[in-house]
Amino acid sequence: MESSAIEKLIRERRTIRQFNEKTLPKETIMDLLEAAVWAPVHSRKEPWRFILFMEEGRKQFSDAVLYTFSQEERERWEQKLQEDYCQRMQAHLLVVIEADPRQRVWEDAVGAGAALIQNIQLLAWEQGIGVVWKTNEYNFDPDFCRLTGVKPGERIIGTLHLGYFDQNKIPKPRPRTPARERLTFICDAMGEKQQ
């Protein structure tokens, strides 16, 4: 059976970690976001907002990351991080949601935010734009949040690094477990299971 365009896109998308320095226009990212916000939302309220660092603003982002490093880590990684974050990667996007103490509301917001991030990744891939979705320790650091404009009562659910990449730098796919191996199939009212 022939794959649909969306299935092909899902199967071929890769996480990109090596970017080139080709300029990524702000309008392109805005178009990605305008389409991505059509992710499923479990409430009447869309739970997300975005903080975008581009051009000279990339230095504010990289400085905020470096601020969370120890002196030893800073000395070891500062030059590479500045090159990657301020030259190669063309944009850094924080996807932020409100922290809600109600478990269900929080999980619904995280699920919707994850669906939105997947939309961004697929839409970007379709245009030859690479994305790496990070949930590093700095996302949870109060100083990083303060320095990047995350408000009290908000949480970062993903830092997305975006940029163009060279086709010869696309990583090979990692194998996936077939869904049938992870499926419990309940086929009658008695709840009898088939594996």
Image (cartoon, grey):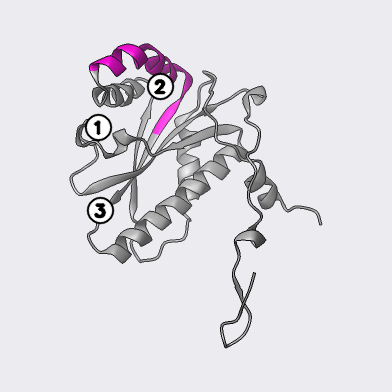
Residues under labels 3 and 2: Cα distance? 27 Å
Residue at the (66%, 55%) spot, across then down: 178
Q: How many marks?
A: 3
Percent across and percent down for residue 27 are 47, 34
Residue under numbered circle 3: 99
Q: Mark 1 — residue? A: 144
Occupied quadrant, residue 149: top left
Disc 3 and disc 1: Cα gap in Å? 16 Å
Q: Looking at the rendered structure, which numbered label has been put on residue 85?
A: 2
List x then y, in percent, for residue 156: 32, 43
Assess whether residue 75 is covered by the magenta stretch.
yes
Question: Regarding mark 1 in the picture, which secondary structure is present there?
Answer: helix
Q: x, y (%) of residue 120? A: 50, 44
Amino acid type, mark 2: Tyr
Name the residue type under label 3.
Ala
Residue type at the position of mark 1:
Phe
Residue in front for this viewpoint, 118 or 81: 81
What is the crowding at mark 1: few (fewer than 14 residues within 10 Å), some, or many (at least 20)?
many
- Residue 165's tag is none
Q: Is residue 78 magenta?
A: yes
Residue sitting at x 40%, y 52%: 113
Quadrant occupied by the N terminus: bottom right
* Residue range corresponding to the magenta coloring: 71-92
Q: Quadrant of the image for the C terminus?
A: bottom right
Q: Element type at marker 3?
A: loop
* Nearest the eye: 45 or 75: 75
* Residue 17 x %, y %: 52, 27
